[in-house]
Amino acid sequence: MFTMTSVGDRLNQLKSHNQCALIPFITAGDPDLETTGKALQVLAENGADVIELGVPYSDPLADGPTIQAAATRALEKGVKLEDVLNIVRETSSKIDVPIILFTYYNPIYYRGLEAFLQQIKSAGVKGLIVPDLPLEEAEILLETAQKMGIEVTLLVAPTSSQERIEAIAAKSQGFIYLVSVTGVTGMRTQMGTRVKDLLLDLRKVTDKPIGVGFGISSPEQAKQVKDWGADAAIVGSALVKRLSQGSPEEGLQAIGEFCKSLKEAIA
């Protein structure tokens, strides 16, 4: 039985030792819920420092085609939030890696803010990312989640002004999620050149850990964002694609090997 640390504590601990964290993302329920539970353990055993778990949603505005397709497959199998939380509940006692839930705001609104947060907390969720919730409307969620011990991480876009970067950096909990490209998630051959400048801009206004995501699809790209000064590399589509190919066993082996190679590149 593990006592899971918070997202912020885990990343700050690594940061204090000049280590870059690896945050893999998978979509819950793809290819099936049983495989999702196994995948969380495989990722934890192969270098993941924090894990993002995506809740399947019918209108995923921030997600590219790979993650959209995974969410669609999961929804077609009837996967619901309760199923996702059951997997977290079953798995969180077996791994010492904090789990962040990635969800759009509609499921939160539907259940009611406090009820939703209580539900995910009791399952063992440590962090929350809500990509369609703007800073201007996030205050109640941030305050309520903080009281419950759940860290809500906010996203900084490449198009953000310095003023907005400062405002997001001040409010974000756990870490700051720097989006590397303008647009949706997905695998790309080159990282956005503005990432390096944005990391420098963020460093001027905050000492919170900074994670870079959207577009990292190889160990070389993970190392690049580390060399630019990121405290965490966030990898989603490249893992989701590997997990969906072949049999579930082949998918699990593929994400284990890929996760290990990513961690070795940024160690």
Image (tube, grey):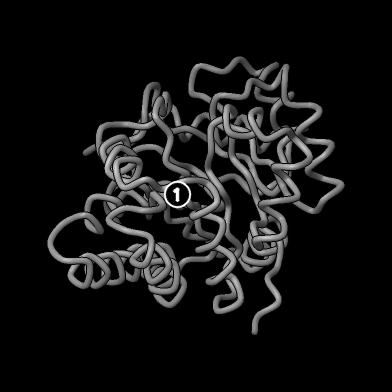
Secondary structure under the numbered disc 1 in the rendered image? strand
Left/right of residue 226 with respect to residue 89 in the rendered view: left
Say which of 225 and 170 sits in front: 170
Q: Residue at x 31, y 53 (%)?
A: 30
In the image, residue 156 lies at what x, y percent?
Answer: 57, 28
The N terminus lies in quadrant = bottom right
Q: Residue at x 81, y 28 (%)?
A: 140
- Which residue occupies the extreme front position in the image? 78
In the image, residue 108 lies at what x, y percent?
Answer: 64, 34
Q: Residue at x 65, y 40 (%)?
A: 153
Task: Identify whether 32 is placed above or below 101.
Answer: below
Task: Identify whether 158 is placed above or below 82.
Answer: above
Mark 1: few/some/many CA within 10 Å (<14, 14-19, 20+): many
Task: Identify whether 186 is placed above or below 249.
Answer: above
In the image, residue 113 lies at what x, y percent?
Answer: 74, 34
Q: Amino acid at mark 1?
A: Ile
The residue where tag 1 is placed is 234
In the image, residue 182 lies at what x, y percent?
Answer: 40, 22
The C terminus lies in quadrant = bottom left
Q: Residue at x 50, y 54 (%)?
A: 84
- Which residue occupies the extreme left position in the image? 246
- Which residue occupies the extreme right position in the image? 147
Left/right of residue 17 with respect to residue 187 in the rendered view: right
Say which of 157 and 255 sits in front: 255
Left/right of residue 7 with respect to residue 107 in the rendered view: right
Disc count in the image? 1
Left/right of residue 142 with respect to residue 37 in the rendered view: right
